[in-house]
Image (cartoon, rainbow, N blue to C red):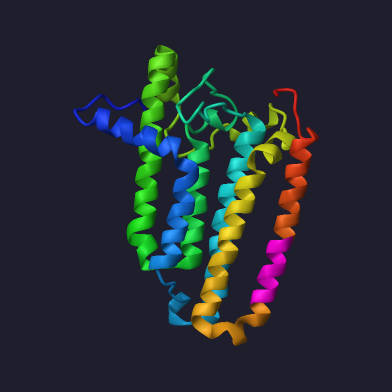
Amino acid sequence: MSVATQSPWSGLHDRIGRFFFGYRDYLAPLCGILLLVLAQPRPFLGDPRLDAWQNTLGLLVCAAGQLLRFAVIGYAYIKRGGTNKELDAPTLVASGFYAHSRNPMYVGNFLLLVGLAIIYNAAFVTLLVLPVMLLGIHAIVRAEERFLKERFGAQYDEYCRRVNRFLPDPRGLAATMSSMKFEWKRALRKDYGTFFAWTSVAIIFMIVERLHWFGHEVSMPSLRRLAASWLVLLALYLVARWAKKTHRLDTIDD
């Protein structure tokens, strides 16, 4: 799949992509706040008592996205996170999961968004937030593609011909993984914050749901369990952060 040819709108599209790239860490929390302020959750099949099934499905989709991110970082870390909110890529990484999808991290990110949307189940999310986030991801990817094309030229063109933009090609994936060492320390160091963020949002969504449908008094047992779960997650987050700051999660690529 090759990079799309330039169009009259490519300059605007590129600026939008670079804007989303530079402020991507703030856009998801902003959407979450707007969601809680403007949207009301809907119970699964109209029955709040069945909502646990929908929440379970949403958590499973989020877990799939997190596992994909974790595997991508652990098997082949790509330094394309940018510098000073600008696109940057010292090398073209085409190994690990990047040999099967050009943007596996964005696939993981989208699964996280879809999973959270399933948990909250609001029309506002389905009709506005998810499409906007998807357009933002697509704009970032297109901006990155133009940047990589300019930097790596024919090497990047050949990579695009071999590997899909998003949809992972499972052929040879087992061989790819068996031929590489999984750096669990690197994966944990790079992604513990993402895990804590989406699990915290999921818990907030479930708390809001319970309060919205059953009120404070009836919801107290569930709220206590959710609060206890979040405290466990917070403790794990602090341990991971301490391990990172004390260089216990450093790897040879640092």
> At 30% across and 27% down in the image, what residue appears?
4
Query: Looking at the rendering, which quadrant does residue 233 occupy?
Result: bottom right
> At 61% across and 82% down in the image, what residue appears?
219
Report the magenta residues as a range.
223-231
In the image, residue 240 lies at what x, y percent? 74, 45
> At 71% across and 50% down in the image, what residue appears?
237
Q: Name the main secondary structure of what is drawn in magenta.
A: helix
Give above or below for 123 relative to 136: below
In the foreground, 2 or 183: 183
Query: Looking at the rendering, which quadrant does residue 36 occupy?
Result: bottom left
> At 54% across and 23% down in the image, what residue appears?
94
Tell me, yes or no, whether the highlighted magenta stretch contains residue 224: yes
Mark count: 0
In the foreground, 34 or 138: 34
Query: Looking at the rendering, which quadrant does residue 203 occupy?
Result: bottom right
The answer to whether residue 84 is visible is: yes
For the N terminus, give its image quadrant: top left
Left or right for 55, reference 12:
right
Q: State the residue lying farthest toward the left.
A: 8
Give above or below for 9 relative to 207: above
Left or right for 128, reference 69:
left
The answer to whether residue 169 is visible is: no
In the image, residue 206 lies at what x, y percent? 56, 70
